[in-house]
Image (tube, helix red, strand yellow):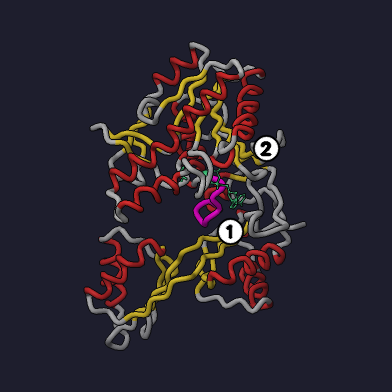
Amino acid sequence: MKIIVQKFGGTSLDTAEKRGLAVEHIKSAKELGYLPVVVVSAMGRAGKPYATDTLIEIAEEACFNINPREKDLLMSCGEIISAVVMVQSLQKTGLAATALTGAQAGIITNDNFGEAEITKVDPMRIVRYLKEGIIPVLAGFQGITADGEITTLGRGGSDTTASVVAAAIDALYIEIYTDVEGVMTADPNLVENARILDKVSYNEVCELAYQGARVIHPRAAEIAMKENIPIKIKSNFNKNSGTLIHNQGLRGIKGNRPVTGVTSRRNIAFIKISPQKPAEYATGLIVFKILASHGISVDFINIHPEVISFVVEARNSEKVKQLLEKYDFVFEFNDGYVKVSVVGGGMTGRPGVMARLVEALNQEEIEIYQTTDSHTTISCLIRIEQEKESLNALHKAFKLDL
Ligand code: ADP
Ligand code: ASP
Ligand code: MG
């Protein structure tokens, strides 16, 4: 069987017209002799009636603290509604289709509500429908625990559903349809001159996704890389070929270009702790142990005798403040930062990348509060007000618009 997985994001499904375009992509795949397995996200973004954020808002209106279990139950409805509506749209054009929840599709997870990990996929039911010539339309972003609790896979997790299902049924490739042309050198909503990347390596796309480019969920890219399943990221709104993600090793595809893309992650809080005794390095050890034992990850760590600084995601702000107060640390806490990153397999072992980055930001009078780097990424901590400016400056400095 020539099976492929076609995943449609929320912004490709929020009007009858857009769903019609999605149906055309599914129909074309069938006409070419493929057996498509369809994965859908909840329809639309915040503000649309059945979008994930809207569902959360409704429950929060009743009571702000939703139990994680109930929150997952609620969020899973968005994708289920979407799957049913897609089945109706397919049936209208004469294509036989059946909607499946994550549980019915055999997606088993642990019970980490809100960020559940898939422990097993039993594709028996999907395969049965494919053999009967029926298109399975799966509600993305959800699964079920061994004892029957509904879970979700983390925001943006429908991409993960597409990858795990593709791996379980030996799909030839995955197509991810979205509202942009593919993986681009930057988010086109922030950088006007962003260009589409025809091909990009799994490593680069994973790194871009981890550093905030939400065009694909990092876990989805990671699974596809491990299983060596090619991914095509395409626009739902045309027939362009989009971006092919495949195995190009660590080096960037454009050999002579150190940076492949720029990206940013918002909602970062910056914390500075003043150790109470000079040169008290033990303070750092205690702080990081406390935060780790509460499952809070830290980044941009800097340990100095007079100050220990690090950042956390803003969603953990309250918890971190409470912990630091509880243990009597003297600290400064500031919200409103963004992590801006340049990513490229081609920067490994290449001198001058950091210099070019600092120069580009200096020229625009953008203050860098911290930096970190790995062999494929350099990240800077910047004030949120300067996010767009810094992305554009870096995009230009690394000639990504050419
Ligand atoms: P979907 O509903 O299709 O899953 P998402 O909002 O999750 O859509 O992802 C698509 C969005 O990702 C785009 O609208 C774009 O704003 C954003 N994005 C961020 N970085 C990039 C990038 N490097 N290339 C393309 N899109 C990007
Ligand atoms: N609907 C979910 C979200 O908004 C999952 C997804 O879109 O992939 O996060
Ligand atoms: Mg998405």
Q: Give the image quarter of residue 246.
A: top right
Secondary structure, mark 2, is loop
The correct choice, above or below, for 298 with respect to 162 in the image is: below
Residue that protrudes farthest toward the right in the picture: 402
The yes-or-no answer for disc 1 within 8 Å of ligand 1 is: yes
Instruction: Confirm whether the magenta stretch covers residue 51.
Output: no
| Disc ID at residue 263 | 1
Stretch in magenta = 209-216
Q: Amino acid at mark 1?
A: Thr
Q: Residue at x 36, y 46 (%)?
A: 115
> Where residue 171 sits: x, y (%)?
52, 26
Find disc 2 in the rendering and name its residue.
237
Secondary structure mostly seen in magenta is loop
Q: Residue at x 36, y 34 (%)?
A: 143
Residue that protrudes farthest toward the front in the picture: 62
Q: Give the image quarter of residue 147.
A: top left
Q: Nearer the viewer, residue 47 or 242?
A: 47
Q: Amino acid at mark 2?
A: Phe
Image quarter (top left, top right, bottom left or bottom right) of the C terminus: bottom right
Q: How many marks?
A: 2
N-terminal of the pair, mark 2 or mark 1, is 2
